[in-house]
Amino acid sequence: MCAISSSFYAQIDVHLLLNALNAACRKLSVGILENCRITDLLIDNDEAIGVKTKNGELLSEGVVVASGYSSFRFTKVYPGKSC
C-alpha cells in the first residue's frame, strides 16, 4: 500500500508511489528522462504542449508537472484541465 486516505487524514509513501509509477510507465513504453532540468513550459492556446530544456524542446500530447509542493504555482499561471 502506498497511500492512506480518509476524511480526517491523508498520507502517502512517495517512494512506493514513484516506484509503482515508474514500473507502470516503463511497462507502457513511456519515455522517462531523469536529471533533465525543465527551463520553461511550451504553451499553445492556453495548454501545455511540451517543455523546454537546456538541450532543446520536447513536444508532447501531455505534460505532467511534478515539482512537489511548488506545483501549485503552475496551476495559477496555466489553468489547465483538472484530472
Image: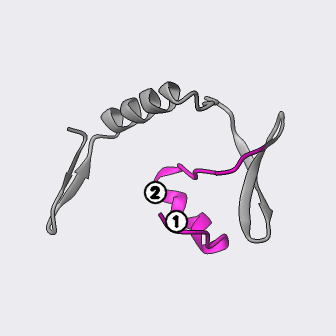
Residue at 44 percent across and 31 percent down: it is 24
**Viewer-proximal residue among 49 and 55:** 49
Label 1: element kind? helix
Along the viewing direction, whichever of 43 and 54 lies nearer the viewer: 43
Which picture quadrant has residue 56? top right
Question: Badge 1 is on which residue?
Answer: 72
Residue found at x 25% / y 40%: 2
Q: Is residue 40 visible?
A: no
Compared with 63, 21 (above or below) is: above
Q: Give the residue drawn at x 23%, y 52%.
A: 11
Q: Specify the amino acid type for callout 2.
A: Tyr
Image x and y of residue 43, in percent = 78, 62
Residue under pointer 2 = 69
Q: Give the image location of residue 9, x and y in percent.
A: 17, 61
User: What are the residue bounds of the magenta stretch?
Assistant: 59-83
67 lies left or right of 6:
right
